[in-house]
């Protein structure tokens, strides 16, 4: 999230797309209601009418997988009718930056496409540079080579009529939503897995970013692009590098293409080197010195061209390349798509370690219904873990707020907190390799690892002064107070640089609970918990001001340039490189200073920001999505229709699928005529491992169901409670039908597209057992993020011989 939960009350418009926030984030929804009470317009865009839809002022039904087309259509309308914020666009985005004249886009492909490798050569995606390596600027937004003009031309294909033909949302309603977003600012966009679980997930979120930059909604109270995560500590897990391609704090992990620290810095930029050195000092302590590159050589180097994501991990297990898998706090035997591959892969493992509070479907995969335990040689070890209410530690919500959570009760029996289990295993491994001369064991032998409590870990994450520093005033052993305390010379450490300051001055700031002090009345509450970075509540807040440092009219002031004091000040921590660098300096104009350009990106260009005085290195290197610098509409891998704009390039051209042809069949509309989307129910959480072991929740929702629209129910002679067979190219299952008006068919061109829905919360373990829909879902994944396409695949529905009891006179096709 660029903003935070309480800030939603400051919105004048809220667009919720790809999320049923009322059911899945109910504590967030109260702030949406507060905004609504204050006069905000709530818009919900979703294929299925939900509790969120019922509370919205505008509800738009969208065909699954067409979000980029909807967003591009709105952008096209906003640009064509000059509803964008021109001052913001010129000041805070790369709108005027001139792009490479060789760049092109034709028939669904950007310039540089390599069909054999499903990838792009991105050299034409850059800027025109001056002699010093900085982007050249156009004189006006009308220059055909500037980023704004390129965006305008790109989205001009998405007329209101084209948007309707692709998404199923009436053209007039798209226009209404675009005008509501443009005329009621600032506004926020909220999204969740309904946006990301597609093979175009990254580009869908890019579209949100571009739209909000056009409207000047980033950096302001009541604005932002806000991912709805947080409640299961997804944010904290990502902060601490649960993603294979990152180290803590979102530093790129090292690859074999960067064998030395100098290679790493050259690729990733000098700006990251300071944070990398601090991370290495936290990892290795006194063993990390300038002479040994702070232990960089001890880090494992992933292969630069290999995908180490969850889906490829199971494919490696299937191929016999992965021998041991340790699963902590996840239940892939329910949550992964294409479960037949998942189960086959686990059966090829030598050892499977499951760290959980229950014997989940993953731990019991070898004795699942239909399996022959004698044929599975995998050794399964179940480590009893403590529940979240049985352990101390922090949790980080979507807004980056770090809060300390106290143990309410002691864990039962031999169950232990996850951190303690990992600690025990590490110490045992360290004892095993203490006399080893193998280079691979140096990372274990040199690790600085001496924790006794969860707070010890948080202190290491925060960071220390390794030696006295007169410049910062820190003495050796002092806990650092803010990000700017960190040094690149090895004199400080920080396990995750974005958390530097969470334990400032020896105080655990995540324990703070001041819910009274609220400067500016914006709902910031700076004394409640601690938010990364530097306790900042709204990211990019420099962009809330014009080029002179004066807050833009129409939104609430949060930071500003104080000419008298000669520094940035305000109700929040100013998001600027240096508080005393005013708007008349280059630093004072870098509202997006962690990016290579220092501005928001309408066009995601290839760019390396020159580092002053270092001819071989760059200050920062821009990230470019693998599938293009602009968000194009591509159909899901299994789609009932052809791509309206370019039938020859139907789905994402950078997608490689199937990766394992023997286990990854692709369904076609002639055999599987309906679109399946999946999500969760309010009464059960994620894989249901906990909630399906709670009797009163099972009473509320005792079993899975397949929601089907009334029109399909009439065609197939199905009533609520009837059993149906639901099948895809990957498998089949039986489940009860729920006939509902919440689902309706789409008219796409001359085709009728029917969507059905099923929750994914069930498996064969627990008090409530039920069919797992992920036997049917497809494991095609976004090429940039590795997120599976569980929101759109093709299925068939057939009524079985079992029917619900018929009630005389009962209307057919009703819930």
Image (tube, grey):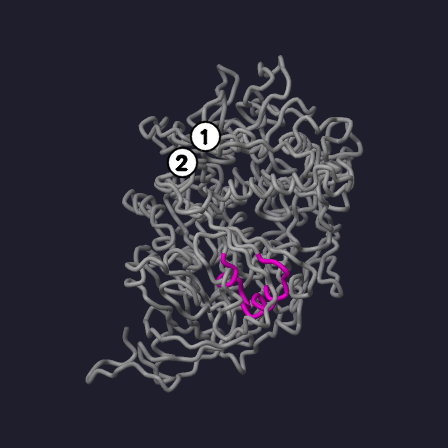
- Which residue is outermost to the bottom? 801
User: Taking 202 as reference, is 667 above or below it?
Assistant: below
Mark 2 touches mark 1? (CB < 8 Å): yes
- Label 1, on which residue? 551
Is residue 667 visible in the rendered image? The answer is: yes
Q: Secondary structure at mark 2?
A: loop
Magenta range: 331-352
Query: How far apart in space, not on screen, are marks 2 and 1 (Cα)?
Result: 8 Å
- Label 2, on which residue? 555
Q: Where residue 520 appears, x then y in whole percent?
A: 36, 28
Q: Residues within 10 Å of mark 2 (few under 14, many from 20)?
A: many
User: Taking 53 as reference, is 639 above or below it?
Assistant: below
Q: Residues within 10 Å of mark 1 (few under 14, many from 20)?
A: many
Q: Which of the two residues, 173 or 661, is positioned nearer the viewer here?
A: 661
Q: Where residue 551 appears, x then y in whole percent?
A: 45, 30
The image quadrant that residue 693 belongs to is: bottom left
What residue appears at the point 28 percent right and 73 percent down from the top-left corner? 815
User: Taking 489 as reference, is 618 above or below it?
Assistant: below
């Amino acid at each position: 999230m660029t903003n935070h939960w309480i800030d939603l009350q400051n919105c004048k418009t809220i667009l919720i797309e790809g999320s049923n926030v009322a059911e899945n984030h109910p504590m967030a929804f109260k702030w949406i209601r507060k905004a609504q009470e204050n006069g905000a317009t709530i818009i919900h865009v979703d294929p299925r009418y939900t509790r969120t839809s019922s509370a919205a002022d505008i509800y738009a039904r969208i065909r699954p997988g067409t979000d980029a087309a909807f967003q591009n259509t709105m952008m096209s309308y906003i640009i064509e009718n000059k509803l964008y914020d021109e001052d913001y666009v010129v000041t805070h985005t790369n709108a005027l930056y001139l792009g490479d004249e060789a760049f092109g886009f034709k028939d669904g492909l950007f310039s540089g496409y390599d069909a054999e490798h499903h990838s792009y050569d991105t050299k034409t995606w850059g800027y025109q540079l001056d002699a010093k390596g900085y982007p050249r600027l156009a004189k006006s937004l009308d220059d055909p080579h500037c980023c704004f003009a390129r965006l305008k031309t790109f989205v001009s294909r998405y007329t209101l009529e084209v948007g309707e033909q692709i998404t199923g949302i009436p053209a007039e309603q798209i226009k209404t939503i675009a005008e509501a977003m443009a005329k009621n600012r600032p506004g926020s966009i909220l999204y969740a897995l309904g946006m990301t679980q597609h093979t175009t997930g990254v580009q869908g979120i890019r579209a949100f970013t571009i739209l909000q930059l056009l409207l000047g909604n980033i950096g302001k109270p009541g604005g932002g692009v806000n991912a709805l995560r947080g409640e299961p500590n997804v944010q904290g897990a990502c902060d601490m590098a649960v993603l294979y391609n990152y180290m803590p704090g979102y530093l790129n992990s090292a690859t074999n293409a960067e064998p030395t620290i100098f290679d790493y810095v050259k690729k990733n930029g000098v700006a990251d080197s300071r944070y990398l050195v601090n991370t290495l000092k936290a990892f290795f302590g006194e063993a990390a010195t300038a002479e040994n590159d702070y232990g960089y050589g001890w880090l494992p180097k992933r292969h630069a061209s290999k995908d180490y994501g969850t889906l490829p991990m199971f494919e490696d297990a299937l191929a016999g390349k992965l021998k041991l898998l340790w699963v902590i706090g996840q239940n892939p035997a329910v949550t992964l798509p294409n479960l037949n591959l998942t189960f086959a892969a686990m059966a090829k493992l030598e050892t499977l370690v499951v760290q959980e509070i229950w014997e989940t479907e993953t731990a019991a995969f070898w004795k699942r219904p239909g399996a022959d335990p004698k044929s599975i040689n995998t050794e399964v070890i179940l480590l009893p873990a403590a529940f979240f209410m049985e352990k101390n530690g922090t949790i980080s919500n979507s807004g980056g707020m770090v809060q300390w959570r106290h143990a309410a009760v002691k864990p039962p029996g031999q169950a232990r907190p996850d951190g303690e289990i990992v600690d025990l295993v590490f110490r045992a491994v360290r004892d095993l390799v203490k006399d080893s001369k193998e280079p691979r064991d140096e990372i274990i032998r040199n690790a600085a690892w001496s924790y006794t409590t969860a707070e010890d870990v948080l202190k290491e994450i925060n960071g220390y002064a390794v030696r006295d520093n007169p410049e910062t005033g820190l003495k050796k052993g002092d806990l650092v107070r803010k990000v700017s305390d960190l040094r690149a010379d090895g004199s400080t450490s920080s396990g995750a640089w974005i958390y530097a300051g969470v334990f400032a001055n020896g105080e655990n700031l995540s324990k703070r609970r001041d819910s009274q002090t609220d400067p500016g009345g914006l709902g910031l509450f700076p004394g409640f918990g601690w938010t990364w970075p530097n306790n900042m509540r709204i990211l990019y807040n420099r962009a809330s001001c014009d080029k002179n440092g004066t807050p833009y009219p129409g939104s609430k002031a949060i930071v500003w340039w104080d000419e008298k004091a000669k520094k940035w000040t305000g109700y929040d921590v100013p998001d600027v490189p240096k508080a005393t660098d005013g708007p008349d300096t280059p630093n004072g104009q870098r509202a997006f200073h962690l990016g290579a350009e220092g501005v928001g990106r309408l066009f995601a260009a290839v760019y390396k920001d020159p580092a002053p005085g270092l001819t071989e290195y760059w200050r920062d290197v821009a990230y470019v999505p693998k599938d293009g610098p602009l968000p194009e509409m591509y159909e899901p891998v299994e789609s009932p229709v052809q791509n309206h704009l370019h039938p020859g390039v139907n789905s994402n051209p950078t997608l490689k699928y199937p990766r394992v042809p023997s286990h990854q069949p692709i369904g076609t509309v002639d055999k599987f005529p309906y679109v399946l989307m999946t999500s969760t129910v309010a009464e059960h959480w994620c894989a249901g491992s906990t909630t399906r072991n709670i009797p009163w929740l099972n009473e509320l929702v005792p079993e899975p169901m397949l929601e089907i629209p009334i029109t399909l129910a009439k065609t197939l002679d199905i009533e609520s409670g009837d059993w149906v067979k639901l099948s895809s190219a990957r498998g089949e299952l039986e489940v009860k039908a729920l006939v509902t008006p919440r689902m309706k068919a789409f008219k796409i061109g001359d085709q009728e597209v029917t969507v059905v829905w099923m929750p994914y919360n069930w498996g064969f373990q627990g008090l409530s057992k039920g069919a797992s829909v992920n036997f049917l879902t497809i494991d095609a994944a976004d090429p940039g993020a590795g997120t599976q396409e569980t929101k759109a695949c093709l299925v068939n529905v057939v009524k079985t011989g079992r029917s619900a009891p018929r009630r005389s006179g009962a209307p057919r096709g009703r819930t």
